[in-house]
Amino acid sequence: MALGLDDTTLTEQGLAPTATGRILLIACGALAHEILALKRTNGWDHLDLQCLPANLHLWPDRIPPAVESAVAQHRAAYDDIFVVYADCGTGGQLQATCARLGVAMVEGPHCYSFFEGNAAFAATAETEFTAFYLTDFLVRQFDAFVWRPMGLDRHPELRDMYFGNYTKLVYQAQTDDPALDAKARECADRLGLAYERRFTGYGDLAPALAAVAQRGA
């Protein structure tokens, strides 16, 4: 199920968001918590949020048409639209769709990259190709987005086939939360991987949204 507009939007209040300067963020549902936190912290009340289902990542080919549909649905009500997805396994198709629609999107191959910082992630890509990454969202939703989709709940013997070439689990922490840290460590144990916690905060997401917010200020 798609996440709806957040609790600060005009749509939630039964009003059409047609005021000058309003910007719509069309985002992956896995980023909702982080985007709302940045909105609150920075007072970006002119940014509204529409999230698409986070589980679209299980079928990356569905992301570009879902984004296109959302842009078509909301374009008339907003001065600007920004897509809060990286490429996310679409093989450049999301970028091509956004270019055709005339909307901008977050830079980077995936959220692990922009949370780390695209430049920093690229610099370590050749030495960390045996790392399996989790974000705050994926730690919270590990069973729903990793364990069960891979069939490990039914066939735990598949773990070594899936993860035999990985050496460590890297938890890219957006927040300092001991409970999430403990859960991430448990995820590493379940996968038979060494554990590393790496505090990234919001990485490149924060400046990207700040630049978008300035356009409507």
Image (spheres, helix red, strand yellow):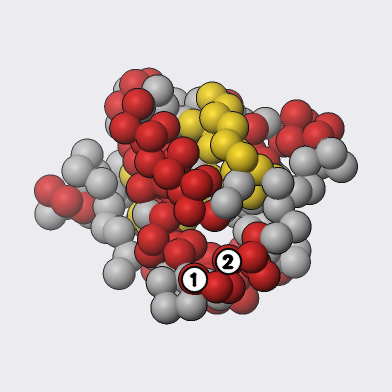
Q: Residue at x 75, y 63 (%)?
A: 92
Q: Residue at x 58, y 27 (%)?
A: 198
| Residue 154 horizontal/vertical position (percent) | 42, 78
Relative height, residue 151 to residue 85 (above, below): below
Residue 156: mark in rendering = 1
Contact flag, marks 2 and 1 (Cβ < 8 Å)? yes
Relative height, residue 136 to residue 94 (above, below): above
In the image, what residue type sits under mark 1?
Answer: Pro
Determine which quarter of the picture holds residue 170.
Answer: top right
Is 30 left or right of 103, judged from the image as shown? left
Residue furthest to the left in view is 13
Q: Nearer the viewer, residue 88 or 192?
A: 192
In the image, what residue type sits under mark 2?
Answer: Arg
| Residue 141 horizontal/vertical position (percent) | 37, 54
Is 195 left or right of 179, judged from the image as shown? right
Is 137 left or right of 7, judged from the image as shown? right
Residue under pointer 2: 159
Q: Nearer the viewer, residue 61 or 212?
A: 61
